[in-house]
Image (cartoon, helix red, strand yellow):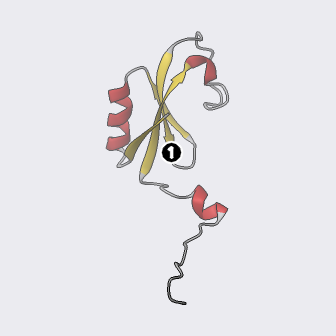
Amino acid sequence: MAHGVLKQNVLTPTELAHLGEGSLAYLREIDSGDLKGKFPGIVDIQPGIRLWALFAANGQPILLSDVREKAIAQALQNDLTPVVTH
């Protein structure tokens, strides 16, 4: 390696897609009107209700709750580190 040149680690798209898999869960507040595309097969819920959605690192939905602490507890029970996203 030449003096002064930094080596960069580059992730492939596949590696990036699996980053955090099995160890991280993403917690996000979501409007009930936005659930259809994120939770396939979900029944209709009145729009305008704020809920907490927990997703696996790969984007798969894990659970939906009206209480933030319940979603966090579920992640911890499954040995997942919850990360809040916006």
Residue at image mark 1: 56
Q: As drawn, is 36 to the left or to the right of 58?
A: right
Q: Outermost residue, bottom direction?
A: 2
Seen in the picture, residue 8 relative to 31 is either above or below; the reply is: below
Q: Residue at x 64, y 62 (%)?
A: 14
Residue 55 pos. (x, y %)? 51, 39
Q: Say whether residue 14 is left or right of residue 22.
A: right
Q: Nearer the viewer, residue 86 or 24?
A: 86
Above or below, 31 against 17 in this view is: above
Q: Residue at x 45, y 54 (%)?
A: 22
Q: Quadrant of the N terminus?
A: bottom right
Q: Secondary structure at mark 1?
A: strand
Residue lying at 41% horizontally and 53% vertically, measured from the top left: 23
The x, y position of residue 69, in whole percent, is: 32, 28
Rendered location of residue 2, percent (x, y): 54, 90
Q: Residue at x 45, y 44 (%)?
A: 25
- Residue 61 position (above or below residue 69): below
The percent position of residue 74, horizontal first and vertical second, equals: 36, 36
